[in-house]
Each structure stands twice: as C-alpha cells, then as structure tokens.
Amino acid sequence: IVLSASWGRSDAVVSGIAKPDSWVLARESLTVKSRELGDREKKIVRNPHADHGPVEVSTTPAERAQPSLNEAQVRRLAAMGRDLMQRR
C-alpha cells in the first residue's frame, strides 16, 4: 500500500508546489516498509483574510522537520485502503 500526504490542502501536491511525504506499507501487516519525507516548503491553505479562496504560504521549520502524518494516522489510512480493496 502506498500513501502520500503533505501539509495543507491537496492542491499543493496536485499543482506540483510540494512533493509529498510517501509511505510504503505491507498490505496484510501494515508494517511500514519505507518512508520518504518530501519537499514541503510551501502549502496551500484557506485564505485567513477572506471568506473563501486558497492562499500559498511557506511551511514552518517545525512542519518541514516532521512527517505530515504520524504513524497511527498512516496505519489507519492504510487499513481503510486495504479494507476498500478487499470489498471489490
């Protein structure tokens, strides 16, 4: 199972502004086989100065130093993905 995530909205990954963090997990045991932190210098968030619309901002040093998901979140998402695959 492969997961990708980044800080902020998914627009940053889709548009190429940010390279996401990536995890590869074993399908049955959900053991993390590999993890790679992406280049996440920018993120897209809701514009705090307007009622709507996104805005591009820099990530903080703390955000760049840690993965965008913790291990529990990664396993939970992988389990949901595995369950959906099994229902096919």
Image (cartoon, grey):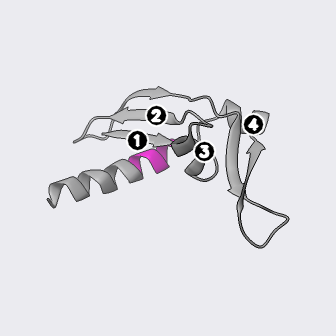
Relative to 55, is 23 above or below?
above
**Residue at the bottom extreme, as displayed:** 51
Q: Residue at x 44, y 45 (%)?
A: 74
Q: Main secondary structure of the magenta part?
A: helix
Sequence-first tag of 3 and 1: 1
On residue 12, the disc is 3
Please tell me which residue is depicted at 31% across the width and 41% down the height of the picture. 30
Q: Say above or below: 32 vs 46.
A: above
Q: Nearer the viewer, mark 2 or mark 3?
A: 3
Q: Nearer the viewer, mark 4 or mark 1?
A: 1
The answer to which of 3 and 41 lies nearer the viewer is 41
- The picture places residue 13, in percent across and down from the top left corner, at 54, 42
Of marks 3 and 4, the one in the foreground:
3
* Tag 2 residue: 22
Q: Earlier in the sequence, mark 4 or mark 1?
A: 1
What's the CA distance linking mark 2 and mark 4?
18 Å
Question: Residue drawn at (68%, 44%), measured in percent from left and top?
Answer: 43
Q: Which mark is residue 3?
A: 1
With 45 as the anchor, is 20 left or right in this view?
left
Cα separation, mark 2 vs mark 1, equals 6 Å
Q: CA distance from mark 4 to mark 1?
A: 21 Å
Dividing the image into 4 quarters, which one contains the N terminus?
top left
Mark 3 or mark 4, which has the lower sequence index? 3
Answer above or below: position of 82 versus 39. Answer: below
Residue type indicated by callout 2: Ser
* Residue 11 horizontal/vertical position (percent): 57, 50
Residue located beneath label 4 in the image:
62
The first of marks 2 and 3 along the sequence is 3
The answer to whether 57 is drawn above or below residue 41 in the figure is below
Secondary structure category for the residue under label 3: helix
What's drawn in magenta, residue-wise?
69-76
